[in-house]
Image (cartoon, grey):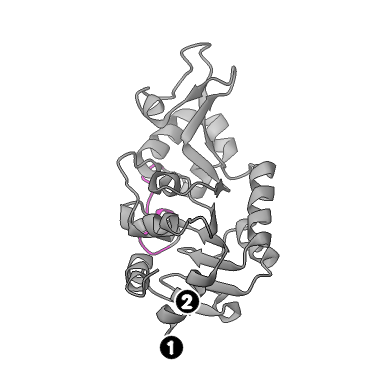
Amino acid sequence: MDKIEHLAEILKQSKHLCVFTGAGISVPSGIPDFRSAQGLYNSDSGYGYPPEQIISRSFFDEKPALFYQFYKEKMLFPNAKPNDAHRFFASLETADRHVSVVTQNIDGLHQAAGSTDVFELHGSVHRNNCMNCGKAYTLEELLAKPGVPRCDKCGGVIKPDVVLYEEPLNEDVVWGAVNAIRKSDVMVVVGTSLVVYPAASYLRYFSGGHLVLINKSETAFDRSADIAINDDVVTVVHQLQQYGV
């Protein structure tokens, strides 16, 4: 039995599946990742500062205009659509199988594909709030505002609900994600090199039957997995569908 066939059987038998995703699952949707050779962190930002510095909380507070120039140009993809991998994992939700998604992504594509139990560790570009009065704004409303977007109610600066460097993760989201991992009988890790902490450390809470890693390149966790597949996730899900998953 090859890896794909074995994984197909595991997924068919799972009752509590947890899918843990990183940037790699959204690359086929046209959203660049962060750490590959072509990723955001390895490209010249064109702004005179490293990307990691620009997307820090202190930079946001000190240079909001430059932050928003970078953010709107490099990190927002309002026309991106879910790809076959997003739709595949959403389709695994059935009356007999619960599927939780724990994601490091901020693009909202899992929900757009139909996943209903999603824990966004690093927030979402689709939620934005005035830092003064708390008024909520959609991504479309944010993009319609030039320069530093300001609240039309009180004039305060609007901030994306995205976890920046130097900011803590949302505790409620973290505990929801940890509980989803703990309860799962199968955990499938997709499109992440597992080098971003604390998110990568959450794998230690998994004690179910099968840990599966799907990533284009090898990770330090491959040897710990029951199945490790180094391939494009869309290619993998197409192969799984041939086995009736």
The answer to whether residue 54 is visible is yes
Under circle 1, the secondary element is loop
Mark 2 to mark 1 CA distance (whole Å): 10 Å
The vertical placement of 227 against 124, above or below, is below
- Checking the image for residue 1, the label placed there is 1
Q: Which residue, given by chain and number where applicable, does mark 2 sit on?
A: 9
Q: Name, please, the residue furthest toward the bottom.
A: 1
The vertical placement of 126 against 214, above or below, is above
Q: Residues within 10 Å of mark 1 (few under 14, many from 20)?
A: few
The vertical placement of 47 against 199, above or below, is above
Where residue 140 appears, as percent x and y from the top left, is 37, 29
Could you tell me the amino acid type at mark 1? Met
Where residue 72 appears, as percent x and y from the top left, is 38, 36
Q: Quadrant of the N terminus?
A: bottom left
Left or right: residue 185 versus residue 31 is right
Q: Name, please, the residue furthest toward the top.
A: 153
Q: Kindly report the secondary structure that dominates the magenta region of the rendered protein.
A: loop
Q: Give yes or no for contact between labels 2 and 1 (Cβ–Cβ under 8 Å).
A: yes
Q: Range of the magenta residues? A: 36-47
Say whether residue 41 is magenta.
yes
Q: Residues within 10 Å of mark 2 (few under 14, many from 20)?
A: some
Foreground residue, 72 or 213? 213
N-terminal label among 2 and 1: 1
Say whether residue 121 is magenta.
no
